[in-house]
Image (tube, rainbow, N blue to C red):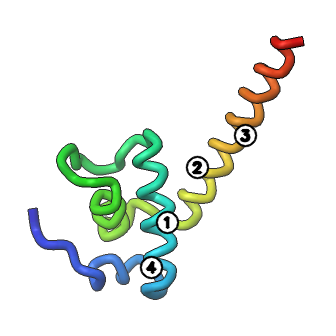
Amino acid sequence: MARLTVEDCLDHVDNRFNLVLLASKRARQLSLGAKPLLDGEKDKPSVLALREIAEGLVTFDLINKESSSAMLEDLVYDDDVGTNNN
């Protein structure tokens, strides 16, 4: 595997600060069980997140969409659990 650089990622993200935000959000999703967009069985979630960004597969739109879907699923699950306990 080729070495990953910040410059590879900055081709797809405005600046280093947004890169950190995007990579951390994606790494958290991966560590919580999100499906990887690349084959990276041996990579840690943080490295895999950066590789996905460098390939142009992960954007803030995708992250926000997945986060919204996950929150909605949590709300539905919490509501279902609450109605079953009554």
> Is 86 left or right of 77, judged from the image as shown?
right
Q: Which residue is mark 4?
A: 13
Q: What residue sits 41% from the left and 47% below the top? A: 31
Q: Nearer the viewer, residue 39 or 20?
A: 20
Residue 42 percent across, percent down from the top left: 18, 48
- Amino acid type of the residue tagged 2 in the rendering: Glu
* Amino acid of disc 3: Leu
What type is the residue that disc 4 sits on?
A: Val
- The residue that label 3 is drawn on is 72
For this rendering, which residue is in front, 48 or 11?
48
Where the N terminus falls, by quadrant? bottom left
Q: Secondary structure at mark 1?
A: loop
Chain-order first, disc 3 or disc 4: 4
**Residue wearing tag 2:** 66
Q: CA distance from mark 1 to mark 3?
A: 20 Å
> x, y (%) of residue 8?
27, 79
The correct choice, above or below, for 38 with respect to 56 in the image is: above
Q: Secondary structure at mark 3?
A: helix
Left or right? Give the position of 2 relative to 72: left
Marks 3 and 4: CB-CB under 8 Å?
Answer: no
Q: Quadrant of the C terminus?
A: top right
Query: Which-is-in-front pick, marks 3 and 4?
Result: 3
Query: Which mark sits nearer the N-terminus, 1 or 2?
Result: 1
Distance of label 2 from label 3 (alpha carbons): 10 Å
* Amino acid type, label 1: Thr
Label 2 and label 4: CA atoms lie apart by 18 Å
Which residue is denoted by mark 1 in the rendering?
Answer: 59
Q: Residue at x 54, y 57 (%)?
A: 62
Q: Residue at x 83, y 21 (%)?
A: 82
